Amino acid sequence: MQVMDDDFDAASDDRAEFAADSRPIPMPRIPDEPMPPVENRFLFVDVAAQRAKQLRRGALPRLEPLRPDPETGERPEVSIRLERVAMEEVEQGLVVYELPEANS
């Protein structure tokens, strides 16, 4: 299973040092259309756990009240646990995931 990633690895990008001042303020990647509701509770837990891991590593939240200000880039303080943020993102269809092909 693969979850859409918001991470930017400046260490692997040699231009990041020069582009840091001119880069636009990063915004979280939000799917054009919401994903269908996850009906399988095991899939829900897997997707939410991977998204929570991304959030703990610094990915931007996709929930509207937690998004950074597009003008200043300032992030609002997250007062709830990141696991709860991840679950809410999955419930709202904001996390894109792919299922592996079933072996027949």
Image: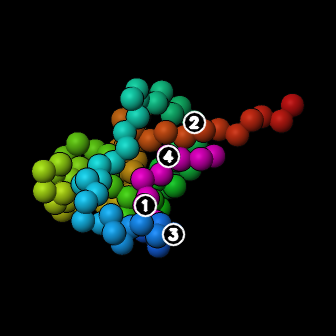
Question: In whole angstroms, how far apart are the C-alphas of marks 3 and 4?
Answer: 19 Å
Amino acid on which the number 2 mark rests in the picture: Asn
CB-based contact (under 8 Å), mark 3 and mark 1: no
Name the one closer to the observer, 38 or 68.
Answer: 68
Name the one closer to the observer, 18 or 47.
Answer: 18
Query: x, y percentage for residue 3?
Result: 53, 47
Residue segment shown in magenta:
1-9
Q: Earlier in the sequence, mark 2 or mark 1?
A: 1
Q: Is residue 9 above or below residue 66?
A: below
Q: Disc 3 marks which residue?
A: 12
Name the one closer to the observer, 3 or 48.
Answer: 3
Using the image, tell me which numbered label, if any, was put on residue 4: 4
- In the displayed structure image, the side of residue 2 where residue 49 appears, left or right: left
Q: Nearer the viewer, mark 2 or mark 1?
A: 1
CB-based contact (under 8 Å), mark 4 and mark 2: no
The crowd level at tag 1 (other Cα within 10 Å; few <14, some 14-19, many 20+) is few
Amino acid on which the number 3 mark rests in the picture: Ser
Query: x, y percentage for residue 35?
Result: 46, 30
Question: In whole angstroms, how far apart are the C-alphas of marks 2 and 1?
Answer: 31 Å
Q: Disc 1 marks which residue?
A: 8
Indicate yes or no whether the magenta region holds residue 8.
yes
Q: Earlier in the sequence, mark 3 or mark 4?
A: 4
Is residue 57 at least partly visible in the picture? Answer: no
Amino acid on which the number 4 mark rests in the picture: Met
**Residue at left offset 59%, top offset 47%:** 2
Question: In whole angstroms, how far apart are the C-alphas of marks 3 and 2?
Answer: 37 Å
Q: Disc 2 marks which residue?
A: 40
Q: Nearer the viewer, mark 3 or mark 2?
A: 3
Q: Nearer the viewer, mark 3 or mark 4?
A: 3
Could you say whether the residue bearing mark 4 is in a helix, strand or loop? loop
